[in-house]
Amino acid sequence: MSTKNIHVVIVLFSLIGIETINVQIQATPSEVILGQNSLQLRCSYTTVTGEFVTSANIQAKINGQFKTLATFYTPSVPFNATLSTDGKYLTNRVTLTNPTTFSTDSAIMQFSQIACEDKNEYMCEVSYAGSGGSTAATSGVTNISVKGNPEKPDSEPSYIPSAGIEEGNNVVFTCTGNVGKPQGKFRWVRYRYNSNGDTIQETPYESQNTTVVQMPGNCSFNGTSQLTLEMEQLDNNAVVRCQVIYQNVPQELYQQTNPIKVYYSVRNVQVTKSPIIPTFTEGAGPITLTCSSDGNPIIINTGYTWYKEFNTSVPLWTGPTYVINNVVVDKTDNYICVAQNSFNGRTFNMNNSIHIQIDFTTTTATTMTMTKMETTSTNHKTFSMKIEKESSTVVNSILIAVVAVLTVLQLGEIVGVYILHKKGIVQFKIGKKETVYADVNSDSTQIHVYSTMNSAEDSGNSDYNEIH
Ligand SMILES: *[C@@H]1O[C@H](CO)[C@@H](O)[C@H](O)[C@H]1NC(C)=O
Ligand SMILES: *[C@@H]1O[C@H](CO)[C@@H](O)[C@H](O)[C@H]1NC(C)=O
Ligand SMILES: *[C@@H]1O[C@H](CO)[C@@H](O)[C@H](O)[C@H]1NC(C)=O
Ligand SMILES: *[C@@H]1O[C@H](CO)[C@@H](O)[C@H](O)[C@H]1NC(C)=O
Ligand SMILES: *[C@@H]1O[C@H](CO)[C@@H](O)[C@H](O)[C@H]1NC(C)=O
Ligand SMILES: *[C@@H]1O[C@H](CO)[C@@H](O)[C@H](O)[C@H]1NC(C)=O
Ligand SMILES: *[C@@H]1O[C@H](CO)[C@@H](O)[C@H](O)[C@H]1NC(C)=O
């Protein structure tokens, strides 16, 4: 009771010399949830001797002024409680109960359903007769507040583009739904997967705007929020969740996308060999080369192609596994695996290689002597190297391995000669523009290198030859 009211009461007391009626209004509960039904407005009065109540009004503020919603009568008047014109909006939603005594009792308005407009300020006015004649007394004001519970978002977040998403694309996600009253909002959470397949929740996107419109038919809010994400490789199979935050508390109300497919070009091409040993010996068991890679779409079997580095114009094999069955020295090479995938009408390639070294079986050290000779003729320079082994050291038939690396400046672009010799078979590798051949006999190996300095470009690629 305010000081002003106390003064009024004191003035009344001093005028009529007695205590007077006490009127109160109470809402139980004072905060109600839309759609629920446990609300009671109770107007109570306590009279003093000589006073008797004839009627009570429950009032609410309509357009800024308190207006009577319903009138109740004590047994002194044989009328049922009724809704007034201003209270017609409550028809079928409230039950009115008259007080049964005119001294100390309550008029009750029981709600069977809560609507948005029930949020209001309420008061009670009691008409009574006393020693001062017929008059009225009012209660204080009580407030009813109405809340709307949020609901699960309308559907899984939609996103654009909805298909054919590539690494680097910006994707816009949209979420709508009832965020409640007072208005809540949405936040976004992205879940990715790590290499173990575990779900990783990222830091939620909390500050995305949620725009709201009041929902027709109730005072709850329909929110809309958008999130734009630039998709990365790690977002392949990620899930994006839209979650309701109501009164600053994240709710167990969310919807999330299905795993999102994000295309990315083939990468991480790895080539392994089995058995894992640095060098192989001629005649050893098969060598298995295996290629693996990452990409979306994943690389299918026919997306793997194998080449030998010395001739990449002819594929060796298609499939993730290539087996070198006949392990002979001339299979020594870099083996290249090219992996390929394609999406949205484009094809992507990535390759990696492994060096496979196959050596002769050497039973004894061979002593060799090398002799270099150089002659120049009109259009080419000849470089010769004679390699002789001491015949007394040959244990098996003929079994030698020779590696000669030439870094002779006069030869222009020759960077290396690679000679392997067994039983008259000689192989060698050489850079551009030179021709190399070898003479083989049981006791010596001669290599002739022609540097065709003045001749036309030859076929270009590194060469790999066999001489029988
Ligand atoms: C409010 O209305 C919307 C649709 O109009 C409905 O989805 C929602 O459940 C309603 N809320 C309450 C609390 O009745
Ligand atoms: C009061 O309501 C009851 C039941 O609804 C009805 O039977 C009775 O006639 C009504 N009395 C008056 C005075 O309207
Ligand atoms: C009731 O609501 C009115 C308007 O919103 C506000 O001015 C008043 O302070 C409230 N009273 C109480 C007791 O909460
Ligand atoms: C919210 O609004 C969107 C359109 O903006 C509508 O599709 C959706 O059904 C609405 N949701 C609710 C719960 O009313
Ligand atoms: C949210 O809306 C406010 C005001 O409209 C704007 O200033 C802000 O940039 C928006 N934030 C985002 C993340 O869109
Ligand atoms: C690669 O091998 C193919 C087939 O054996 C042959 O036609 C082609 O000339 C070779 N390319 C080179 C550069 O040696
Ligand atoms: C391997 O990749 C490199 C670099 O992209 C490319 O230059 C080369 O041609 C590729 N090799 C094959 C055999 O595809």
Image (tube, grey):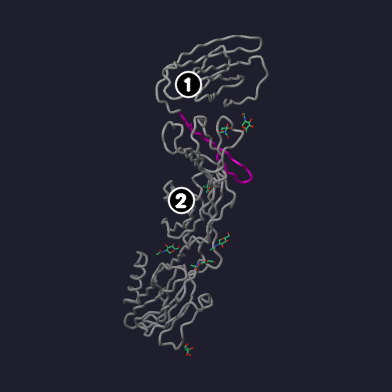
Nearer to us of marks 2 and 1 is 1
**18 versus 444 height, above or below:** below
**220 versus 113 height, above or below:** above
Residue 191's label in the rendered image is 2
Comes first in the chain, label 2 or label 1: 2
Is residue 165 covered in magenta? no
The residue lying at 55 percent from left, 33 percent from top is: 308
CB-based contact (under 8 Å), mark 2 and mark 1: no
Specify the amino acid type for callout 1.
Val
240 vs 436, left or right, is left
Query: Which residue is more in the foreground, 427 or 245?
Result: 427
Looking at the magenta stretch, what is its main secondary structure?
strand
Q: Position of residue 87 (x, y in %)?
A: 51, 76
Specify the amino acid type for callout 2.
Tyr
Secondary element at image label 2: strand
- Magenta residue span: 338-359
Query: Which residue is more in the foreground, 227 or 198?
Result: 198
Q: Position of residue 238 (x, y in %)?
A: 49, 50
The residue lying at 37 percent from left, 65 percent from top is: 4
Residue 402's label in the rendered image is 1
Q: Position of residue 133 (x, y in %)?
A: 40, 81
The residue lying at 40 percent from left, 25 percent from top is: 363
Q: CA distance from mark 2 to mark 1?
A: 59 Å
How many residues crowd mark 2 within 10 Å: few (<14), some (14–19), many (20+)? many
